[in-house]
Amino acid sequence: MATTTIPAGAAAAFSAMGARRILVFGGIALIAAGMLFGDIFAVFVLHQNGGQTGQALLAAANAVVAQDSSAVNAAFAQIGNLLEDRGTKVDAHVHMIDAGYLALLLALVQPFVALSASSKKILARLFLTGGLLLPVGIFLIHYVGLAYSPFSVIGWASILADSAGALLIIVLLVEGWGFWNYLRDRHAGPVEPELPKDRTWERRVLLSGGTMLVLLGFIYGAWYAAMNLYEHENRESVILTASRVRPPCVVAGSAIIEAI
């Protein structure tokens, strides 16, 4: 039976239970789990949620025609609940995948982080812990709400998510500090073995193509947030405000004209 021998360089670069190995396997697990959760959400929740939101909007419009303020408030409360349900699940899916990508990025720069091996291992475990708890906390926001919370505007799930996010930021700052220390000493070599310098066509295509996809995704997200996000939110606010004082047919016509 044929056996596969791991190259010595690869074995040295991925020491057993080292920081790089923890980050690589943990990052892959976070990405896979985030994608799986996103697929399940898209199949079993997303479209049903959109249909219920449309029905609630129609109910709100009918209530405006009937001048039933209590029914309008109830319809918009249902819409808010549906949007929160959808939004928290989308955010949980996205944040889990993003944490996985950041873990893989940290794994690449580990040879250039001037910290001890034990410190980097602790940081890797803390990062993966935060990367897991952050989407879990976001997911639970819709279900936990403000129950048993000592605060009036933030619940325990939000506290968990914020704490996990703060943990990720702290780890990134410490890793950045170690990288800065490495850059200050220009004559110092890598503090641990680098990845094998494999220049095969497959590796170059996967590395460069994957990097481009990640960068394009971040650039598009930043462009949308800067150019369109607040404009779209303002349009939604204008339409919802107008629906309280004008017939729904006029509101719908105005919305179509603005969209065009």
Image (cartoon, rainbow, N blue to C red):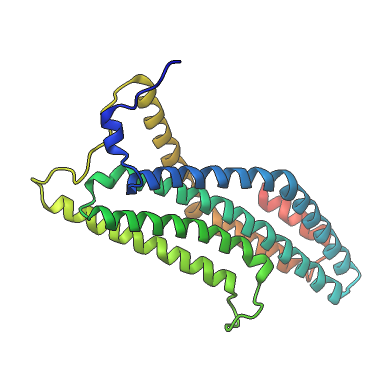
Which quadrant would residue 148 be assigned to in this image? bottom right
Which quadrant would residue 77 be assigned to in this image? bottom right
What residue is rendered at 81% in x and 71% in y? 74
Q: Would you say 99 lies left or right of 49 here?
A: left
Look at the picture and state if 25 lies above or below 140: above
Which quadrant would residue 187 be assigned to in this image? top left
Q: Position of residue 205 (x, y in %)?
A: 39, 25
Q: Position of residue 180 (x, y in %)?
A: 20, 55
What residue is rendered at 71% in x and 69% in y? 241
Check the picture and name the quadrant holding the N terminus. Answer: top left
- In the foreground, 187 or 94: 187
Q: Position of residue 135 (x, y in %)?
A: 55, 58
Residue 196 visible, this orientation:
no
What residue is rendered at 39% in x and 47% in y? 23
Q: Residue furthest top?
A: 1
Q: Position of residue 235 (x, y in %)?
A: 64, 59
